[in-house]
Each structure stands twice: as C-alpha cells, then as structure tokens.
Amino acid sequence: MKKVQNPQVSLETKEIADRMVVFLAREIKDCQTVFHGVSSILPMVAIALARLTNAPNITYLNIPGGVDPTPSKLPSTTVGIQLMEGNRSFFSLSEIFDLSARGKLDLAFLSGAEIDSYGNVNLSFIGECEKPKIKFPGGAGSAMLLPTANRVVLWRTVHTKKTFPRHCSFITASGNVETIVTPLCIFKKTKGKLFLYSKHYGVDVNHLIKSTGFDIGNIDNCPDTIEPRSEELIALHKADPLGIRYREFD
Amino acid sequence: MESKVITLSDAVSLIEDGQTLALGGNSFSRMPSSFVREIARQKKRKLSLVKTAGGYDIDLLCFAEAVSEVIAGYVGFENVFGLCPSFRRSVESGIVKVREHACATVIAGLRASSFGIPSQPIAGLQGSDVPKMTGFEKTSDPYTGKEIFMIPSITPDWAIIHVPYADKYGNARIDGGVFEDILMTRASTQVILTTEQIQETSFFQENPAKTKIPSFLVKAVVQIEQGAFPMSCYPFYDLDEEVIKKYFIQSKSNNQLEEHLASLVNIDYGQKNS
C-alpha cells in the first residue's frame, strides 16, 4: 500500500482540510471556466472533487497550460508534470490572463498572506517596501485576476488576527472576491465588505471573534456551514487518495 | 550552418555582471537549474532576474549574492516548503530590490519588448497598490477614454531556457508546459538554451510547427542531461523532493552553498557518477 504523504498531520487538521476542500468545491458551478494558480493545493483538490460531484463539465485551467487534465494522481505541487496527463489541448498562462481580461474566466481561486475586511489581499510584504520586515512570495496572478475574473474565491488555512486584519498593510490585489473559506468559517463579500456567512460546526463563537481582526457583525443568528456529506467525503477520498490536501497544513 | 553547441562554463561566461536575465520554466518546473548553479560558481554579480513565478533559481542566486534586482510575480517553494529563505533574507536586509509585479504584468512587459513597443496596456490592477509602488502609469485609451494601466517594456539581455529537445543549431521544442519561455525568447536580446537532448535536425523537420524556438534567435546551446534537476522536466523526470528539501535547509541556515553546488557538479558538467 502507498504511504500517506503526511501522516504527521493530526486528525483534527485532517478534518479541517477535508472540510475546506469540500466547501471550496461547492463554490464551483458546472460548465464554467475555473482556474487555480501556483501554490494552490486546496483548490487543486477541490477542482478534482467538484469534477467528480457537482461540476463534472467544468473547463479546468492551470499554470502548466493543459486543458482538462486527468492526472492519474494529484501532484504535490500545482505545476506538477502529472497535470500534463490526458490533455487534449493547451491554453497557456498568458492566454488564461487574456481570457480573464476579456471577461471569460468564470472563477479564479486565490489566497493572501493577509486578507482584510474588504476582501483585499496582501501577498507582497509587511513594513517598508525598500527593506520589508517580512517579504511574502508576491501576488502571482492576483492583481490582474481579482478585478477581471467574474468570481474569485479565496482560501486561507490559517485564521488569526494577523491573517485577517481590518486593513492589509499593502494591497496586492483587490476586486471580485465573492467567498472566503477559512478553517473556522465562510465569509462572503457584499457592498465592498466581508460578512460572516456561516461558521463551521463546532467552532466557538468567541474563538472566531478573537481570531478575526475586524468586526464580523451580529454572530448570534449565524448558521453553521453545512457539514460535508458522506457522498462528498467518499468522492474526496477518491479524488485525493494520497492526501495531497494535507500538505498545505504541515 | 555552424554548430552553436558550447560548454556550460563557456555559456555562463557570456553573461556579464549587471545584466538582466529572463529565466525559463515556472515554480518547480523546467527551470535552467544547471545554468543557474554555474552562474553561482562563476560568482556573477548584480544581476537582474525576470520571471513570472520563480523559486529555486532566484533563491539560489540570492544565496550566491549574484542578484541586485528581482522582477517577478511570485518567488516561493509553494506549499511544499514555503517561502524562499535566501530570497527573503536578501530582500529583508535591503540587498536585493524587488520590483513587485503580477505575473501578468511581467508578461505584459515582455510582450511590449516582443512587439517592439515601449509599453503594453493591461486589464486589471484596479485597487492594487502595486502600480504606485512599481511605477505603472495609467493612461486613457485615445478612442474610448477608458483608463488603463501601461506596463513598460522589459527587454532582458538574455533569455536562459532549459528545453527537452534542441538541435546543435538552436532549433528547440518544448513538450509540456511552455509557461513564458517562448515569449522570453522573443523579448530578450539574446537566447541561450540548455537542453536535455541534442536531436538531429530531421527530428524538427518532421514537425516544424512544434519547433517554437527557431535557431536564428539562439546564440548558444548547451547539452545537459537533467539540466533542470532537482526541478522537473517533462517528459523526462519529476522533481526530487529530497534534494530540494536539503537545499531548503541549507538556504535557510545560510551556509553550505558550496556543498550544494559541489553535490550537483556531476550533473552540471555531464560527468556520470561512477
């Protein structure tokens, strides 16, 4: 039997990862064009899951450029050569940006080192730009894709006051963010501001408030996120039997 | 036609301190790793690096103190290892200046150069602090008045591209993801190829439409089997996580660069392990 890639990840973390992938997959609408970029393991798995469940007819676009790849196993990086398998055509990264520019990219998955109360993301740095205190990897496609993709779904595997501040210290990208999936909750954006859409089952309200750097509004009537259904979890294990999704958490 | 095949050492000797290099590949894929290591060995200095999404290549050159400026959309080791240690250290200490870009603005700058125009309009960037910081100006379209960002041309002195197949004259074919490599060969002043295999010219004549890099653009060809190692090179090999992990630790502790370079010298100089 093949070894699970990250056995050191705790059961609790596995549950969080599974939930996040399922919740991200639910954001994918069938028959749409969907893109994930570099360093995007959870969206990659979510797309694989959605293709087995709610969205079998999407057009799956990614950085290596193969359209609708059918990898025999998911790679541990989001530019893995396994994404070359099964492609019938090629559509390069620059063409994907052009597609988004002309309004034809339906959904882009992106993240941020910081995500603020307006759904802006910082992937650039904290501190002075000439000599930053912390240099993040850079925004990759986000500054171009957030304003041009029809919908953007963000995810962040760490939910703290630092990762969810009121204001980003630098705005790498801003735009059509619709949903944000975290280990604790789902935010949606309306009228330019984030609001708490649902909190995940079992998440302590005070913990959620304390972990968020901005006012999340009236929490009393906030519903729980619908837990992953058994058919979703079965499909998830089929989509990602090696547990590549846990690698974002180790 | 004369062969353009030269040694790795001679090819890297063509690079002068202070020049701008566009590096092919993307993230963990098909980067010119051997070439980059030889730059480090030859102790080049003050290079500017151009890439959409880099990682090992940019980090290693920062580790070797060869870099003064990085023009890129992303520099990291993905979720697998995280941020690039030497890149981070160099930027946070002010030694390396980052010209903050989006991948799409790097592409736009390269397109401007490829098209022979001073700048290239681009969709997006609204609401981002990147244009102000990096100096991307807005203009209004002369026909509609619509406001649009203009990205200045990026013309690297060299495009350094690792390919699976080339002939000795510099015709080359990339199977698998091409990323920005073809564009880089058009945008840059000169091109150096490193290649897994040297194929006969007939290989390219059989399917010229797949030869996206024509020889007339290419200055030099270096054959290096596993020249992208420890990164992947489709269709020949996947990345080597163990070697990357070891490098990551060396980079993080800011020592043992020489050991890292020495450990891969056999690959870079084509000497088989005996």
Image: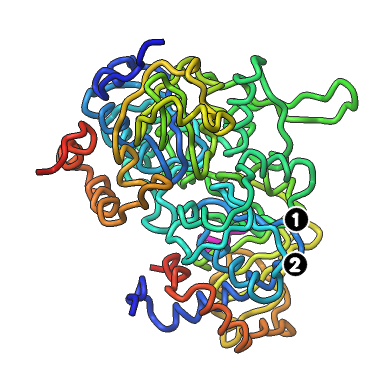
The quadrant of the picture occupied by the C terminus of chain A is bottom left
Q: Amino acid at mark 2?
A: Lys
Badges 2 and 1: C-beta atoms under 8 Å apart? yes
- The segment highlighted magenta reads A161-166
Query: How far across and how far down the image is residue B85, in percent?
Result: 33, 46
Q: Amino acid at mark 1?
A: Asp
Ranked by sequence position, the earlier of labels 2 and 1 is: 2
Taking the image as drawn, is residue A134 in sight? no
Q: Quadrant of residue B228?
A: top left
Vertical position of residue B46 compared to residue B90: above or below: above
Mark 1 Cα shell of 10 Å, populated few (<14), some (14-19), many (≥20) = many
Q: Please tell me which residue is depicted at 38% across the width and 25% down the height of the picture.
A: B68
Q: Please give the residue where the numbered disc 1 appears in the rendered image.
A: A106
Majority secondary structure in the magenta region: loop
The residue positioned farthest toward the left in the image shown: B274
Badge 2 marks a residue whose secondary structure is loop
Badge 1 marks a residue whose secondary structure is loop
Query: How far across and how far down the image is residue A38, in percent?
Result: 52, 51
Query: How far across and how far down the image is residue A78, in percent?
Result: 49, 55
Numbered badge on residue A29: 2
The residue positioned farthest toward the right in the image shown: B144
Q: Please tell me which residue is depicted at 31% across the width and 29% down the height of the picture.
A: B223
Q: Please tell me which residue is depicted at 46% across the width and 54% down the height of the picture.
A: A80
Front in this rendered view, residue A140 or B209? B209
Callouts 2 and 1 on one subunit? yes
